[in-house]
Image (cartoon, grey):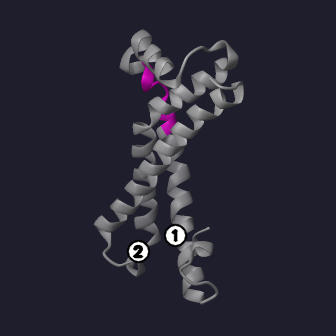
Amino acid sequence: CFTSHLCRISPALLRQASYGTIKIGTYNSLKRLFVTHPEDETMIINVFCGVVSGVLSSSLANPTDVLKIRMQAQGSLLQGSMMSNFMNIYQTEGTRGLWRGVIPTAQRAAIVVGVELPVYDITKKHLLKSGAMGDTILTHF
């Protein structure tokens, strides 16, 4: 790696990019299965969609989480690229190694996402209804 800091941040960025993309995409897709108009959403539907998307996204992205943890823990002792380290985990531990810790990770994500995304949605909904803010990038931020 270019620097030891880059070695530590690259796997974290890979993990967050894959997990975050799957999480938000799944959440919005699931919501569209249950309601056709955003004003028809309920907190129960949003929490359910959040829990399911948290479990799915963390489960699918678990290999990137394992890679991130291993590379960060070993720091400068670790040699090679992310891909070579990923392959090393697979070759030495198999598929089980890539999904090590998936159950507690998925349980945590179910709780976090089951709260995080519905709270975001309801807060945005109230801001828009109040007229205090329009549907702009600032409101989404």
Where does residue 36 sit, x and y in percent of width and height?
Answer: 30, 75
| Residue 73 seen by the camera | yes
Q: Which of 74 and 104 is in front in this view?
A: 74
Q: In which quarter of the image is the N terminus?
A: top right
Residue 41 drawn above or below residue 51? below
Q: What residue type is labelled 1?
A: Asp
Residue 46 drawn above or below residue 13? below
Task: Say what secondary structure mark 2 lies in.
Answer: loop
Q: Magenta region: which residues?
A: 97-105
Crowding at label 2, few (<14), some or many (≥20) Cα neighbours within 10 Å?
some
Please report the residue visible at 59 percent of the width from the left and 33 percent of the height from the top.
Answer: 10
Q: What residue type is labelled 2?
A: Glu
Residue 74 drawn above or below residue 49? above
Q: Residue furthest bottom?
A: 131
Please report the residue visible at 34 percent of the width from the left and 60 percent of the height from the top.
Answer: 30
The residue pinned by badge 1 equals 121
Asked whether residue 87 is drawn in magenta, I would say no
Q: Which mark is residue 41?
A: 2
Where is residue 71, by image quadrant? Answer: top right
Question: Taken as a whole, is the magenta stretch helix, strand or loop?
Answer: helix
Where does residue 9 sit, x and y in percent of width and height?
Answer: 64, 34
Q: Is residue 48 left or right of residue 129?
A: left
Asked whether residue 104 is drawn in magenta, I would say yes
Where is residue 27, by image quadrant? Answer: bottom left
Q: Which of 117 and 5 is in front in this view?
A: 5
Please report the residue visible at 43 percent of the width from the left and 17 percent of the height from the top.
Answer: 87
Check whether the beta carbons of the residues at disc 2 and disc 1 lie within 8 A of each other: yes
